[in-house]
Amino acid sequence: MGLREKIQDRTAVVGVIGLGYVGLPLAVEFARADYMVYGIDIDEKRVGQLHSLKSYVQDVPDADIAEFVGNGKLIPTTDYQVLKGIDAISICVPTPLRKTRDPDIQYIASATARIRECFHPHILVTLESTTYPGTTDEILLSEFEATGLKVGRDFYLAFSPERVDPGNPRFHTRNTPKIIGGVTAECTALAQLLYEKVVDRVIPVSSTKSAEMVKLLENTFRAINIGLVNEIAIICDKLGIDVWEVIDAAATKPFGFMPFYPGPGLGGHCIPIDPLYLSWKLKLFNYNARFIELASEVNTHMPEYVVGRIGRALNRLRKPVNGTRILVLGVAYKKNIDDVRESPALDIINLLQQEGAEVDYSDPYVPQLKLDGAMMSSRPFAGQTLRSYDCVVVVTDHRDFDYDLVARESALVVDCRNAIRSRGPNIVKL
Ligand SMILES: NC(=O)c1ccc[n+]([C@@H]2O[C@H](COP(=O)([O-])OP(=O)(O)OC[C@H]3O[C@@H](n4cnc5c(N)ncnc54)[C@H](O)[C@@H]3O)[C@@H](O)[C@H]2O)c1
């Protein structure tokens, strides 16, 4: 039976490599669509946890793991050898930055090398990890064709960017449209056929490079607009204007304006990182991606700006930062999730500690936080807690916090998210 028929009648065996925020929900969707799925991860702890029927990804309920791992539709494993019997592979490994802020594609490279060891004819490989345009062709295609097999005839290769938005109650894997670009038309067609079984709408594009670029456009668009509005916030502060009022008023325009909101800086695995994959690639063409660099500079500076605002607010109360007790509310990089990767809260805590402040945090999603080797524990959110600090900083506006209580009980609040709707002499907004 050919791959097309196997995908159609759901006898195709699917492998998902990298069971993180992106890979685990995808593996569950393939299992839900009645495919037999192998989830491959190098992290033994994660694989073990799935075998104990427990999820570690907030958007994937334990019940789904219990159902699909329990009934044997989803088999988590660290053993790449299972790929020998697999028809379609989706790669969802991390794509971070190196210390030098250049792309670190070691995880894609190592997954590709491991796939090559088990490579066989009539396999479909789809890369989902966010990366610079050209990765699929330059790294995966050349490695797989070195086996002597020919793409579009003996095997199929595509790029399909992941668009997961952790914590989004409305959009999840199934109802978020998916872009697919294959190396050949047949590669695109087969990847589209497969993904249409788990995603409501699939949009094919003409090449892997276009598909790679789509993701970078989406995230660069966000990074630049956030950079712009962060700068507008700094400008409004200098001019004595409430930036939040300005944005809300501008957002009443029914066309030609889309509101973005300032904040303490970018976080997460996508927006602060992905645009730099693009600007890095452009450097190879001797081109400086100016908007990206500028937005990155503004956004990266925001934690320092916030610490400056905290210092100014305390100064008005004749208090130095040094020795002051400060409580950071929310350390996850965005609201209602438990992910602290690249979170600006970490920089803010660090900078405040460097200034001599005594910093604690409260975050119901992050019970413990490791910062520079030291372990911090979340303080309980309560009026008594708020009262015991000189300054409370709203960094992440989780829905779980009672903001009226924050406004009422805190001596001073620096609100980076416009979470507190009331105004008062003790409230400073970004
Ligand atoms: N998290 C998001 O919101 C999001 C959204 C869209 C796109 N993405 C992109 O998706 C990709 C994955 O991100 P994520 O957030 O799921 O990462 P993650 O860190 O949550 O998960 C990645 C998993 O891959 C595993 N892994 C690493 N190398 C491996 C290898 N060689 N073989 C098998 N497993 C390996 C890790 O152990 C980890 O469990 C990244 O490129 C990211 O930019 C992430």
Image: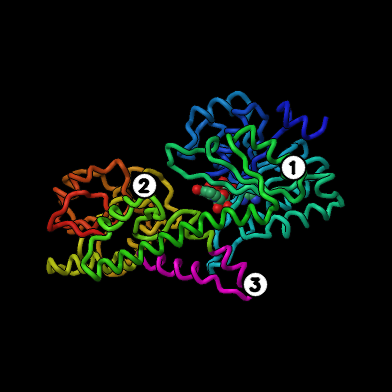
Which of pointers 2 and 3 indicates the residue nearer the eye?
3
Kindly tell me whether residue 12 is visible in this rendering: yes
Residue 287 vertical position relative to residue 32 in the rendered view, above or below: below
- The overriding secondary structure of the stretch rendered in magenta is helix
Q: State the residue position of label 3.
A: 284
Q: Is residue 124 magenta?
A: no
Q: Which circle's residue, 3 or 1, is located before the other in the chain?
A: 1
Q: Nearer the viewer, residue 14 or 249?
A: 249
Kindly tell me whether residue 353 is visible in this rendering: no
Q: Residues within 10 Å of mark 3 (few under 14, many from 20)?
A: few
Q: Which amino acid type is shown beneath numbered disc 2?
A: Lys
Percent x, y of residue 132? 62, 60
Question: Disc 2 on helix, strand or loop?
Answer: loop
Q: Residues within 10 Å of mark 1 (few under 14, many from 20)?
A: many
- Residue at 85% x, 49% y is 149
CA distance separating discs 2 and 1: 37 Å
Q: State the residue position of label 2.
A: 335
State which region is magenta.
Answer: 276-302
**Ligand 1: does it lie within 8 Å of the C-beta at label 3?**
no
Question: Disc 3 on helix, strand or loop?
Answer: loop
- The quarter holding residue 383 reads top left
Q: State the residue position of label 1.
A: 124
Residue 395 vertical position relative to residue 185 in the rendered view, above or below: below
CA distance separating discs 3 and 1: 30 Å
Q: Which circle's residue, 2 or 1, is located before the other in the chain?
A: 1
Percent x, y of residue 210? 65, 55
Q: Is residue 295 magenta?
A: yes
Q: Which amino acid type is shown beneath numbered disc 1?
A: Leu
Q: Residues within 10 Å of mark 2 (few under 14, many from 20)?
A: some
